[in-house]
Image: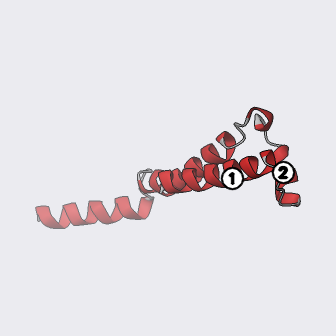
């Protein structure tokens, strides 16, 4: 998921930049893309790619976070029941 969202963000803004270079604009989308850092250097795709990677990484981070108290309580009950 990280790679997919990162590539979608990079492609969209690289496409806008390429079309802008040949004189085709997409109205407000092109104006918005022009405000990105490094857009003048044709590197405006970097920030959207990083944002997409971070958004794609969030579900993975949540999955590996510390379990809630309810899960710990259930695990302790299961361990206690097995030892009896």
Secondary structure category for the residue under label 2: loop
Q: Residue at x 56, y 50 (%)?
A: 6
Colour scheme employed for the rendering of this structure: secondary structure
| Residue nearest the viewer, comparing 64 with 1 | 1
| Residue nearest the viewer, comparing 23 with 60 | 23
Q: How many marks?
A: 2
Nearest-to-viewer mark from 1 and 2: 2
Q: Position of residue 78 (x, y in %)?
A: 23, 66
Which residue was labeled with disc 2? 23
Which mark is first along the chain, 2 or 1? Answer: 1
Q: Residues within 10 Å of mark 2 (few under 14, many from 20)?
A: few
Whether 84 is drawn above or below 19: the answer is below
Whether 54 is drawn above or below 28: the answer is above
Which residue was labeled with disc 1? 15
Q: Residue at x 88, y 52 (%)?
A: 31
Q: Position of residue 17 (x, y in %)?
A: 75, 47
Q: Residue at x 62, y 49 (%)?
A: 10
| Residue nearest the viewer, comparing 57 with 61 | 57
């Amino acid at each position: 998921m990280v790679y997919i969202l990162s590539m979608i963000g990079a492609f969209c803004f690289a496409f806008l930049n390429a079309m802008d270079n040949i004189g085709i604009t997409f109205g407000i989308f092109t104006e918005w893309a022009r405000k990105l850092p490094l857009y003048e250097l044709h590197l405006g795709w970097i920030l959207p790619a990083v944002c997409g990677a971070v958004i794609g990484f969030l579900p993975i981070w949540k999955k590996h976070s510390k379990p809630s108290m309810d899960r710990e309580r259930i695990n302790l009950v299961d361990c206690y029941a097995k030892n009896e």
